[in-house]
Image (tube, coloured by chain):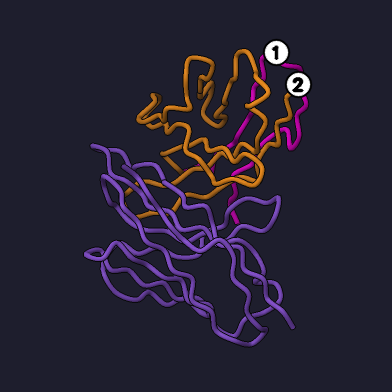
Amino acid sequence: GQNIDQPTEMTATEGAIVQINCTYQTSGFNGLFWYQQHAGEAPTFLSYNVLDGLEEKGRFSSFLSRSKGYSYLLLKELQMKDSASYLCAVRENYGGSQGNLIFGKGTKLSVKP
Amino acid sequence: EPEVTQTPSHQVTQMGQEVILRCVPISNHLYFYWYRQILGQKVEFLVSFYNNEISEKSEIFDDQFSVERPDGSNFTLKIRSTKLEDSAMYFCASSGGGRNTEAFFGQGTRLTVV
């Protein structure tokens, strides 16, 4: 079966660091993605991991451990505009296609002053 | 910056009516997708399309749904006979060639079935 788990909500303070965890169990694996989604808007791409380790991109970093089925998104120097839902998504691999994304329910992050 | 565009942004339709949601993917992308998100719930995969045919579809994508790429730029989702539970935000996405590229999402069409 397919299962992607992440916390429902988190709260953090402006300027701080927050880590959002994601665990997954899927029938195939061809990469893990993190998307940001503001209320009523489309998901926007943040990061991608297909190999184990840390990928850094400015204030955002993402980590993957395939053996543990685990990823996290690290947000540094939080800003008020970072208040959004953060979606963990796994791309499964079917034959020659790129494979669709299986999304978690998202973690709603609230950044307080 | 290239983007995926969707029209209309909002659509209200009566139950049982047909609706067509339209998308213009990023021009050099090869893979196209439809996802939906019921209010307050997670984003769910509906269908993927590559080389002018469906490559994968989910259990949600039943006989009421169809997709088409009628010309070189548009990608459409048709719902033949809408039900109340089809009310959702529908996102079109596209990704480029190669195995390791992200999907870019359009702004979505909010469909309300009354």
Q: Position of residue B64 (x, y in %)?
A: 54, 16
Measuring 39% from the left and 26% from the top, which residue is drawn there?
A: B54
Number of marks present in the image shown: 2
* Range of residues picked out in magenta: B1-28
Left or right relative to B41: residue B53: left
Q: Is residue A52 magenta?
A: no
10 Å crowding of disc 2: few (<14), some (14-19), many (20+)? some
Residue indicated by mark 2: B13
Q: Are marks 1 and 2 in contact (CB under 8 Å)?
A: yes
The colour assigned to chain B within the rendered structure: orange
Left or right relative to A45: residue A110: right
Please, which chain is the residue tagged with disc 2 on? B
Front-lying residue, B56 or A2: A2
Q: Give me the disc on residue B58.
A: none
Measuring 26% from the left and 65% from the top, which residue is drawn there?
A: A68
Residue indicated by mark 1: B17
Whole-angstrom CA distance, mark 1 to mark 2, is 7 Å
Q: Position of residue A6 (x, y in %)?
A: 47, 61
Is A83 rendered above or below residue A8?
Answer: below
Q: Is residue B4 magenta?
A: yes
Measuring 37% from the left and 58% from the top, which residue is drawn there?
A: A32
Is B19 rendered above or below residue A97?
Answer: above
Q: Amino acid at mark 2?
A: Thr
Image quadrant for the N terminus of chain B? bottom right
Q: Are marks 1 and 2 on the same chain?
A: yes
Q: Which chain is purple?
A: A
